[in-house]
Image: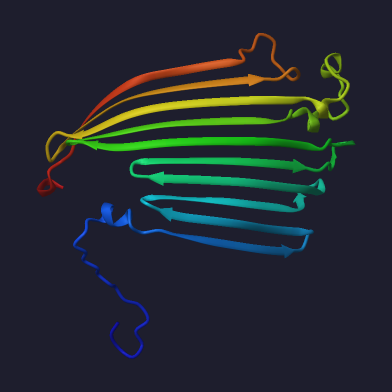
Amino acid sequence: LYGANAFAGVINIVTKISLPKLADRVQGTALETAVAGGNLDLLEGHVTGAFLQGGTEGSVSISGYSGRTPILLNGDAEHRVDRLHANVRRGGFTGSVLHTEHKNGSFPFDTTTTLVASHKTDVVDLRYERQVGETTLRGSATYNHYRGTVCGVCHNNQTGPPDDALTFDLAGERESDQRLRLALRADRSLTDTQDLTAGFEALSDHIERDVIVQPGADQTMASGGIYLQHQWRLPARLK
C-alpha cells in the first residue's frame, strides 16, 4: 500500500510448496446467517455453513421466504419458498444438490378463485474434469425431478370437464416430471491454430400425471447423439 489515501493493494505470495499440496494443508469452517423483513408480510432468512478440509471444500445453505406476492389484476397471493442447497468440490470433481418447496396461495381468477398450488423440485448435478496429456476430459450428469400440483388449479379450479371424469378434487392431483442428462466431452489442441472436440450427449424426459393429458401423448421422450468438431483459428498476425 502506498500513499496517504491508499485503500487497496496486491500481495504476491510465493511458496516453496505447490498450490495443490498447499491446499491439502489449509482447513477451516465458516457460518453465516441473516434475517430480513418488509412490507407485504415479507420474512426471509438463511443459514449457510462452509468448510475446507484436506483439499475438499463444500457448503450447506438453508433458506426460506414467505410473504404476499402482488399479482397484476389478481390482487395479492400468499407465497412461501423453502430451499436446501449443498455442494462439494475436490480436485476435478464437483457435486451439488438443490431441494426447493413452493406453496402459492389462492387468488381471484376470472370469475372464480384458484386452488392452493404447491410443488417440490430436486436437482442433482455432478461434474468431473481431468487433464490427460494434452487432452481435457469432461463429464457431467444432471437429474431434475418435479413433483407438484397440475396446472388445472388455475384454469380449471372448479374441476369441470373433462377432468371431472377422472377426479373430483383437482387440487389433490399431482404430476411428476423427471429429466436426466448425461454428457461426455474431450478437447485437444492440435496446433496453435487448430482444436479438436468430440463428445456424446443423452437426454431422457418422463412425465406422469392422470389429468390434463393429450390423447396419445408420449410420457417418455429420449434423445442423444455424438459430435465431432474441428476448429481453425486465424493466426494472431492476421487478426
Closest to the observer, 51 or 5: 51
Give above or below for 236 relative to 39: above
Residue 149 lies in what quarter of the image? Answer: top right
Task: Pinpoint residue 128: horizontal percent, then vertical percent.
Answer: 36, 36
Q: How is the image coloured?
A: rainbow
Task: Pinpoint residue 212: horizontal percent, then vertical percent.
Answer: 74, 20
- Number of numbered discs: 0
Give above or below for 221 relative to 115: above
The residue shown at (29%, 73%) is 10
Give above or below for 33 relative to 177: below
34 left or right of 236? right
Residue 147 lies in what quarter of the image? Answer: top right
Task: Pinpoint residue 213: horizontal percent, then vertical percent.
Answer: 71, 17
Closest to the observer, 111 or 2: 2
The residue shown at (48%, 32%) is 142
96 left or right of 190? right
Task: Pinpoint residue 45: horizontal percent, then vertical percent.
Answer: 67, 58
Closest to the observer, 121 or 164: 121
The quarter in which the N terminus is drawn is bottom left
The answer to whether residue 72 of the structure is visible from this angle is no
